Image (cartoon, rainbow, N blue to C red):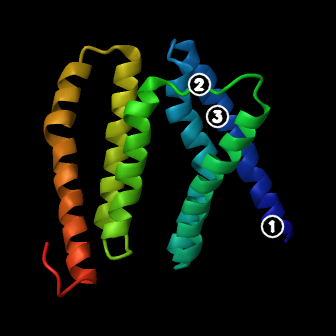
Amino acid sequence: MLWFVLGLTALVVGAELLVRGASKLVLSFGISPLVVGLTVVACGTSAPELAVLVQSAWSGQVDIALGNVVGSNIFNILSVLGISASIAPSNLIVAPAMLSLDLPVMVAVACLPVFFSGSTISRGEGVLFLALYVAYTLYVILYATGHNALHDYSAVMGGFVLPLLAVTLVILAVRHWRHTHPNKRI
């Protein structure tokens, strides 16, 4: 129990230091608070979860790893957001960019593939998730900084990557439907 408490304390302190230091660094470059929240703070606050997930997955306790991810996201969305909105002096304003990009990406990329892949996440899918996160983060940074490469990057993402993901999701959905309804046709 002592090691648990010490480890948890070290994770929380480490995450706090990471978030504060990285946020100050990024804000000194003039990047918006939304981008800092979507990237630096999100990574920093997830660092303790990542440590637990890696250890759980490595030791074969997959239920703890997946439960941590799902439970943490449910807690963040319902409890943290709910408490924040309940005590805020005024309504929390959701940025239009978050509604048009960030929330759909969260639902489509992070949730739907798991539902249609036979209740498993393979190493290849894990690598795909990581690559999609890197692509998303790069887009957010390019957009926030108004970088010249944003137009070309958006064209590649919108003209190739996102349609490929949509086709993949449709194929996974059809496979899942055929597997769960073998005597019916689409």
Residue 19's label in the rendered image is 3
Residue at x 64% of width, y 49% of height: 78
Query: Which of the two labelled residues, at mark 3 and mark 1, occupies the earlier sequence position?
Result: 1
Is 166 left, or right, of 117 in this rendering? left
Crowding at label 2, few (<14), some or many (≥20) Cα neighbours within 10 Å?
A: few
Mark closest to the chain's N terminus, 2 or 1: 1
Q: Of label 3 and label 2, which has the lower sequence position?
A: 3
| Residue 93 pos. (x, y %) | 59, 24
Q: Which residue in the structure is indicated by mark 2?
A: 93
Q: Quadrant of the C terminus?
A: bottom left
Q: Residue at x 30, y 55 (%)?
A: 128
The Cα–Cα distance between marks 3 and 2, rounded to whole angstroms, is 23 Å
Res 55 → quadrant = bottom right
- The N terminus appears in which quarter of the rendering? bottom right
Q: Quadrant of residue 81?
A: top right
Crowding at dot 1, Cα within 10 Å, few <14 / some 14-19 / many 20+, comes out as few
Q: Residue at x 59, y 29 (%)?
A: 22
Q: Is label 3 in a helix, a strand or a loop?
A: helix
| Drawn side of residue 76 relative to residue 124, left or right | right
Query: Marks 3/1: CA distance?
Result: 24 Å
Q: Residue at x 16, y 49 (%)?
A: 164
Front position among marks 3 and 2: 2
Front: mark 2 or 1: 2
Which residue matches tag 1?
A: 3
Q: Position of residue 70 (x, y in %)?
A: 55, 61
